[in-house]
Amino acid sequence: MSSETNNAPVKKRRAPRWLWIGFLVSVAINLLVVGFAVGALWHHKAGKAYRDRGAPKHFGAFLWRLPKERRETFKRKFRERRPEFRGYREDIRTARREAEELLTKEPFDKASFAEANRKLHEARARLRGAQLGMFPEIAELMTAEERAMFLEWRRKHRKRWRRWDRRNKDDAN
């Protein structure tokens, strides 16, 4: 038997042009989605500049619009009140643990769970009251220009679903 060897060059198979175009479009879309995700994370993390709260929501994000020396003034004020807020947060954690234990305990006691849930609500209200009590102190430190700038910033950055009432009031007038 004779073996035939084919010395003819083997033709390289290449993917069709439409496959390469589809691949590049797919990569572009994936990069776009990743870019949106990273941008959203970056945007939302920037809103949590200070975790002390004690001021209206996202006040720390507004502070980044102020000069560094003014930001330091507000940061010092937040640091002064930090121990007070720690105590309130510890009360909340204790009340939450108690409510969670009662929720999983068998047999379930509705009255004791309701009491623990009420204590948790009161602990949260005490923290929120202390936070709201701090805002006048912060407002006192701000200049008139900074207060006006804060109000404008806050109106601009309100959640869209909270803006409906303002639009409806404007339409009614």
Image (spheres, grey):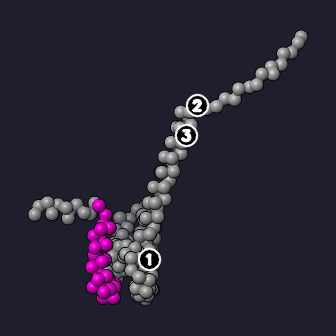
Q: Which residue is mark 2?
A: 16
Residue found 28% across the figure and 75% down from its top? 151
Which quarter of the figure has residue 49?
A: bottom left
**Mark 1 near mark 2, Cβ–Cβ under 8 Å?**
no
Number of the label disc, if any, that sits on residue 146: none
> Comparing marks 1 and 2, which lies closer to the viewer?
2
Stretch in magenta: 133-160
Q: Which of disc 3 and disc 2 is earlier in sequence?
A: 2
Label 1 crowd bin: few (<14), some (14–19), many (20+), radius 10 Å: some
Q: Which residue is mark 1?
A: 50
Label 3 crowd bin: few (<14), some (14–19), many (20+), radius 10 Å: few
Q: Amino acid at mark 3?
A: Phe
x and y percentages locating residue 109 in the rendered image: 38, 65
Residue found 27% across the figure and 70% down from its top? 155
Q: Which residue is mark 3?
A: 23
Task: Say whether residue 40 is left or right of residue 173.
Answer: right
Task: Say whether residue 80 is left or right of residue 172.
Answer: right
Residue found 30% across the figure and 86% down from its top? 143
Tell me the distance, in whole angstroms, between the alpha carbons under discs 2 and 3: 11 Å
Which quarter of the figure has residue 9?
A: top right
Residue found 42% across the figure and 79% down from its top? 52
> Comparing marks 3 and 1, which lies closer to the viewer?
3
Let me know if residue 11 appears in the view. yes
Q: Amino acid at mark 1?
A: Tyr
Q: Secondary structure at mark 3?
A: helix
Q: Is residue 136 magenta?
A: yes
> Comparing marks 2 and 3, which lies closer to the viewer?
2
Q: Quadrant of the C terminus?
A: bottom left
Q: Amino acid at mark 2?
A: Pro
x and y percentages locating residue 27 in the rendered image: 53, 45
x and y percentages locating residue 51 in the rendered image: 44, 76
